[in-house]
C-alpha cells in the first residue's frame, strides 16, 4: 500500500497522463477531464455503463520500475457514480460523486498536493470499463478515437498517434487484470477488480 511519502509519485503518474493534443477548452465543465496539454474530454454518463455496479478495485501505478497502490471502491447506478480511494490504514483519502453531469470531489485536508486527482482516477476507470459506444462522441469532439479489438483497446489522439494501450486479461472486463500502458510519459497502470456485484 502507499504511504504519505509516496503519494507524490501517484499524482505524477495519474494526473500527467497525456502529453499530446491540440483542442483547447478555456473553461472546462465539471464533468470534463484533462487528457493532454490544453485538451479536455467530456466523461460519459454513469448510465452509459449499461448496468449497475458495485466493485472493490486495486489500482497499481508503475513508473521507472517503482510501483504504488491505491485501493478504490466504485459504485455506479443509472443515476449516479461514487468513487472513493483509501489509504493503507483504511481512511478515505479521496472521493468523487458524479450526478446530473456534475462532478464533486474530496481530498483529505493536507494531502491535496500529493494525492492523485480524483477526476483522473475516474477517467482511468471509465476509459477501461465503459463501452466503446459511450466514448465515441466525447472523443470525436476533440478529434480523438478509442479503437477496440477483442481484449485490447487503443486511445489515439488527433494526430493519429497511439497515446495508450489497454489490455484485458479476460473478455469480462471485471475479471482478471486490466493493464493501461501510457506511452508518453512511459508508465503503466493496472486495475484489478477484487470483488464486484453487477445488476
Image: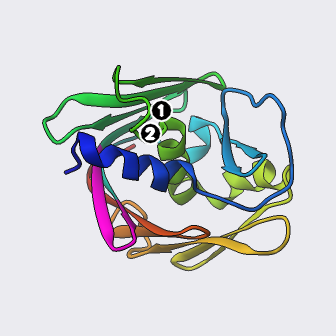
Q: Mark 1 points at which residue?
A: 77
- Mark closest to the chain's N terminus, 1 or 2: 2
Point out the residue furthest to the front here.
5
Residue 62 on the magenta segment: yes
Quarter occupied by residue 157: bottom right
From the viewer's perspective, is 95 left or right of 51? left
Q: Are marks 1 and 2 in contact (CB under 8 Å)?
A: yes
Which disc number belongs to residue 119? Answer: none
Q: Which of 36 and 75 is in front in this view?
A: 36
User: Where is 138 relative to 90, above or below?
Assistant: below
Quarter occupied by residue 28: top right
Q: Give the range drawn in magenta.
A: 61-71
User: Where is 44 relative to 125, above or below?
Assistant: above
Task: State whether residue 193 appears in this view.
Answer: no
Q: Give the secondary structure at mark 1.
A: loop
Q: Give the secondary structure at mark 2.
A: loop
Q: Mark 2 points at which residue?
A: 52
> Dominant secondary structure of the magenta stretch?
strand
Amino acid at each position: 500500500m502507499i504511504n504519505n511519502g509516496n503519494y507524490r509519485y501517484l499524482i505524477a503518474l495519474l494526473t500527467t497522463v497525456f502529453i499530446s493534443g491540440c483542442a483547447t477548452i478555456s473553461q472546462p465543465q465539471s464533468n470534463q477531464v484533462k487528457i493532454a496539454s490544453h485538451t479536455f474530454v467530456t466523461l460519459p454518463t454513469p448510465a452509459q455503463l449499461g448496468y449497475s455496479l458495485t466493485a472493490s478495485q486495486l489500482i497499481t501505478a508503475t513508473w521507472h520500475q517503482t510501483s504504488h497502490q491505491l485501493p478504490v471502491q466504485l459504485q455506479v447506478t443509472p443515476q449516479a457514480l461514487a468513487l472513493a480511494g483509501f489509504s493503507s490504514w483504511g481512511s478515505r483519502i479521496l472521493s468523487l460523486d458524479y450526478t446530473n453531469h456534475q462532478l464533486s470531489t474530496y481530498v483529505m485536508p493536507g494531502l491535496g498536493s500529493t494525492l492523485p486527482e480524483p477526476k483522473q482516477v475516474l477517467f482511468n476507470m471509465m476509459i477501461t470499463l465503459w463501452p466503446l459506444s459511450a466514448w465515441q462522441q466525447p472523443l470525436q469532439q476533440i478529434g480523438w478515437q478509442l479503437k477496440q479489438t477483442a481484449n485490447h483497446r487503443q486511445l489515439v489522439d488527433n494526430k493519429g498517434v497511439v497515446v495508450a494501450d489497454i489490455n484485458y486479461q479476460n473478455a469480462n472486463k471485471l475479471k482478471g487484470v486490466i493493464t493501461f500502458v501510457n506511452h508518453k510519459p512511459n508508465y503503466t497502470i493496472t486495475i484489478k477488480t477484487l470483488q464486484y456485484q453487477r445488476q
